[in-house]
Amino acid sequence: MALLSFLGAIRQVTGSCYLLETHEGKRVLLECGMHQGRREEESNNRRAFPFRPKDIDAVVISHAHIDHSGLLPRLTKEGYRGPIFATEASCALLELMLHDAAHLQEKDAEWENKWRARRGQKPIAPLYTGDDADQVLRQCRPLSYQQSEEVVPGVRLTFHDAGHILGSAIVQLDVNDLGRTRRLVFSGDLGNDCTPLMRSPAVLEQADVLLMESTYGDRDHRCSDDTLEEFLGVLQQAHKDGGNVLIPAFAIGRTQDLIYHLGRFYHEGRLPQQAVFLDSPMAIRANAIYSRYLEQLDPVELERLRGMGVHKVADLLPILRSTATPEESMAINRVTSGAIIIAGSGMCNGGRILHHFKHNLWRPECHVVFTGFQARGTLGRAIVDGADRVRLLHQQIMVKAKVHTLGGFSAHAGQSQLLNWASHFSQRPELHLVHGELEKMLALQGALRHRLGWEASIPEPGDRIAL
């Protein structure tokens, strides 16, 4: 019979990976994500795969975020040559995400090898390179939402809009198993209904086995209007204080939402700052991809934006300045006050935000706004948890800037949204919680039992079930 193995994002948020094996011996890898966070978690990215890449027959990716797709170049580097199925927009974003990740891997190896040489140690190779990322892109097979495709004999794939980021999908796999069909549904990352540009997650009504994310399984996000007023209050206070506003942003999804909200404030005459910098080459390129796929955004919002003459993301905010080059980025730090600086990475574990922290984090008049989940072990999590000093760019920096966490900007569904989405299934599926820290899973498990009368399992790494 068909078997499903839980290999990654089990009792943790990152490293998404599941293996479906059919009774005919075909193997479908669902997700191939990178581990992010603490050093010991990131070290898992170099561990041997719990399968032979050459034995995999097909790969299915729910969306382009690195914790769902970031080990694909390593998979192809180690011999996988089969198809990689994702939505059309996800394939476009994968090109951007994986080349950026490969560049970081190459730079990290280069930096590490300088230190290893001084200690007389052997050099290390990067986890993967740009050439490996190119191989992934050659194997990508784009599918539209609702398009059904047999990915291996006996397994049919359908993508449904997850409303999380552009191209994100709920994955439906219909598995023909010894004469009967069993439906496996993986939620992927479900979107927050309050996200302005994305559609609400598609409602599904039938599943035999359901894998559901639980990133925010312990809480609901604040109402969108309350969050926006709090955000505006931070911007106005920063203007009075005479400091800059730093926003560590995820290049895909969150950045586009922020530009939208800042654009609203600007057009309403409520944005006190007159300089907004987008200091992320990846986010700048992502804006172009979002602009290419505008028709996939929320239709009501899209009609309103087109009525305002908005035909690309940058049109949302006329005072937005995109700083693509290192020289343009460094010039921002000559602006000592009054600017909003949106820079990657979202969890502050790399990217240009580190340089802006170096120039601003120790200044009490400055403000830092976190708009998304900060994984354990990241610099962002340390700052959110109240660290009075942090180490970055080989320096100890005092944290005197005012720190704000605005959960209402999350692109993930909150607890009530997860429960509401699950409640539409006409018959209770066999439910397994994935993609969440254990305490978040336990909270969601209790809420499912209390509100829906459902029992949900919390798998352990390596668990295997029969479909």
Image (cartoon, helix red, strand yellow):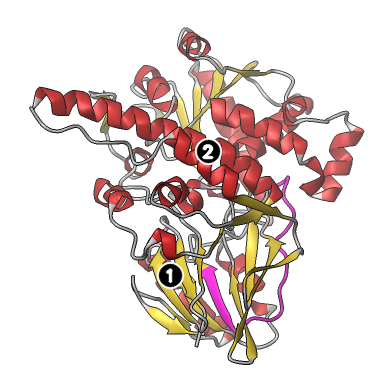
Q: Is residue 334 above or below residue 177?
A: above
Disc 1 to disc 2: CB gap under 8 Å: no
Q: Position of residue 148 (x, y in %)?
A: 74, 67
Q: Residue at x 53, y 47 (%)?
A: 65
Does any portion of residue 84 appear in the rendered image?
Answer: yes
Asked if the stretch drawn in magenta spans residue 162, the answer is no
430 horizontally vs 110: left or right: right
Q: Amino acid at mark 1?
A: Met
> What segment carries the magenta color?
195-212
Which is closer to the viewer, label 1 or label 2? 2
Q: Is residue 301 above or below residue 83?
A: above
Q: Which residue is mark 1?
A: 441
Q: Is residue 327 above or below residue 59?
A: above
Does any portion of residue 346 appear in the rendered image?
Answer: no
Q: Which residue is mark 2?
A: 134
Query: Which numbered disc covers residue 186?
Result: none
Dominant secondary structure of the residues highlighted in magenta in the image: loop
459 horizontally vs 297: left or right: left
Q: Position of residue 363 (x, y in %)?
A: 37, 20
Residue extending farthest to the left is: 120
Asked if the stretch drawn in magenta spans residue 196, the answer is yes
Under tag 1, what secondary structure?
Answer: helix
Q: Quadrant of residue 9?
A: bottom left
Which of the two labelled residues, at mark 1 and mark 2, occupies the earlier sequence position? Answer: 2
Categorize mark 1 by other alpha carbons within 10 Å: few (<14), some (14-19), many (20+): many
Q: Position of residue 130 (x, y in %)?
A: 46, 33
Q: Amino acid at mark 2?
A: Asp
Under tag 2, what secondary structure?
Answer: helix
Q: How many marks?
A: 2
Q: In front: 131, or 265?
A: 131
Q: In front: 461, or 411?
A: 461
Q: In front: 336, or 333?
A: 333
